């Protein structure tokens, strides 16, 4: 039997009501559920530990010879022969030039002849004085004659001494006609050739000899840096480094094979530059360092037994130049900590104030955090240095402080 229109309308109404009821229930249940909270950001931290470091300073310098001697003639004459190879090695006492010595040989021969005459006169005076003394004993001659004979003997002895001195002077002059090297070293080019006339003590040297092994490197250091170092030593922050080798860097930046040692520090500050001189003695067996060459030297001037080093990417600098670090506290929250840095040490900053041993400094993930944020910290591996964060660059030193090298961990 077919259903009536009334029953069909009632069934449709019940179906629509049920659908609306289910939709309403779905809205009510959805409004009660909240979205899950995001996980805390992950960061990488470095736990600070005190370690000994040797503070170093890279200083500019010039190479200077260990010894230098300018060869000049001490007598007049024509250059007869040059006896060395320009640019070669010479030994002390080696003949360098031979001057025309004919005149000096003649003077030497004349002095020797005068000496022979004086010796002959001395022998005659000695015999006369002997005879006169014998006759005076028997009163055969007067006392005056005996005294005159003794005086003549003394005069003859003085003449011999003067003649011997003249011979020695002539030998010295003759020897100076052969010019020798005063020191051992490398000799430069000759300023004269055979046939040139040279004069005693002339202004222009004939050649220059320089001893190059060992060799000196003269450095200049600012007096303000010396004052700062002394303040750190007086405050007990550092100790003076002694007998630490000096590393020489060549003009192209490569380290020199042989370390040097600091031998001299000047006590006078140059008023024009505000710096003072440091002298380093360096072995130079290969003659690689040459006088006048520009080099740089890494000088160790102090040591810190308990230094705190922070990777450079963990230190930020604001537009005013103030430095800060993000530190994770014991509760896992980020704290903005103002710090005072001293200088760079390789990829690290040496921290003077603001941080203590045990602080956990954020070095990676800085772009994801802010002060007061809860984070999940992961310790950086001890066998590597964390790289710079993508949104950060390592800050530059605020006042051009010298570099240093970390000590053994």
Image (spheres, rainbow, N blue to C red):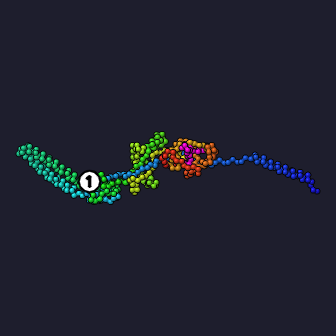
From the viewer's perspective, tell me whether residue 202 is left or right of residue 114. right
The image position of residue 251, as x and y in percent, is 44, 54
Q: Residue furthest right?
A: 1
Q: Residue furthest left?
A: 140
Number of other residues with Cα within 10 Å of mark 1, as a class: few under 14, some 14 to 19, many 20 or more: some
The image position of residue 48, as x and y in percent, is 55, 45
Q: Residue at x 10, y 45 (%)?
A: 148
Relative vertical location of residue 192 with respect to residue 332 in this rendering, above or below? below
From the viewer's perspective, tell me whether residue 258 is left or right of residue 361. left
Q: Is residue 245 something that shows in the picture?
A: no
The image position of residue 399, as x and y in percent, is 49, 45
Tell me the quarter of the image containing the N terminus: bottom right
Q: Which portion, as a residue range, is magenta?
A: 312-331
The image position of residue 373, as x and y in percent, is 63, 44
Q: Is residue 156 something that shows in the picture?
A: yes
Q: Residue at x 30, y 51 (%)?
A: 203
Confirm whether the magenta stretch covers residue 326: yes
What residue would you read off at disc 1? 199
From the viewer's perspective, tell me whether residue 153 is left or right of residue 2. left
Q: Residue furthest top?
A: 235
Confirm whether the magenta stretch covers residue 364: no
Q: Nearer the viewer, residue 262 or 80?
A: 80
User: Tag 1, which secondary structure?
Assistant: loop
From the viewer's perspective, tell me whether residue 234 is left or right of residue 6. left
Q: Residue at x 64, y 45 (%)?
A: 374
């Amino acid at each position: 039997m077919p259903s009536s229109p009334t029953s069909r309308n009632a069934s449709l109404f019940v179906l629509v009501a049920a659908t609306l009821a289910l939709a309403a229930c779905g809205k009510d249940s959805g409004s009660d559920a909240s979205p899950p909270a995001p996980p805390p950001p992950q960061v990488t931290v470095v736990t600070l530990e005190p370690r000994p470091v040797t503070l170093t300073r890279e200083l500019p310098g010039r190479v200077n010879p260990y010894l230098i001697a300018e060869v000049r003639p001490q007598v007049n004459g024509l250059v007869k022969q040059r006896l060395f190879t320009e640019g070669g090695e010479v030994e002390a006492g080696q003949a360098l030039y031979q001057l025309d010595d004919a005149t000096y040989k003649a003077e030497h021969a004349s002095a020797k002849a005068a000496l022979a005459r004086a010796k002959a006169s001395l022998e005659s005076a000695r015999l006369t004085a002997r005879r006169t003394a014998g006759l005076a004993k028997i009163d055969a001659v007067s006392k005056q004659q005996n005294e005159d004979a003794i005086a003549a003997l003394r005069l003859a002895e003085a003449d011999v001494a003067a003649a011997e001195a003249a011979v020695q002077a002539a030998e010295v002059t003759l020897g100076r006609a052969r010019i020798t090297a005063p020191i051992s070293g490398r000799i430069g080019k000759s300023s004269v050739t055979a046939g040139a006339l040279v004069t005693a003590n002339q202004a222009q040297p004939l050649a220059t000899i320089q001893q190059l092994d060992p060799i000196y490197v003269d450095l200049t250091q600012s007096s303000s840096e010396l004052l700062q170092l002394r303040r750190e030593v007086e405050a007990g922050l550092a100790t003076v480094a002694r007998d630490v080798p000096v590393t020489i860097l060549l003009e192209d930046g490569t380290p020199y094979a042989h370390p040097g040692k600091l031998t001299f520090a000047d006590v006078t500050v140059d008023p024009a530059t505000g710096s003072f001189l440091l002298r380093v003695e360096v072995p130079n067996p290969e003659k690689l360092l040459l006088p006048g060459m520009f080099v740089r030297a890494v000088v160790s001037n102090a040591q810190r037994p308990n230094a705190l080093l922070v990777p450079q990417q963990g230190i930020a600098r604001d537009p005013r130049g103030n430095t800060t670090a993000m530190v994770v506290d014991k509760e896992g929250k980020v704290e903005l900590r103002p710090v005072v840095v001293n200088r760079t040490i390789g990829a690290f900053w040496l921290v003077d104030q603001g941080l203590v041993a045990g602080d956990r400094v954020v070095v990676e993930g800085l772009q994801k955090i802010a002060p007061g944020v809860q984070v999940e910290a992961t310790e950086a591996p001890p066998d590597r240095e964390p790289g710079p964060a993508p949104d950060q660059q390592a800050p530059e030193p605020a006042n051009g402080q010298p570099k240093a090298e970390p000590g053994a961990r």
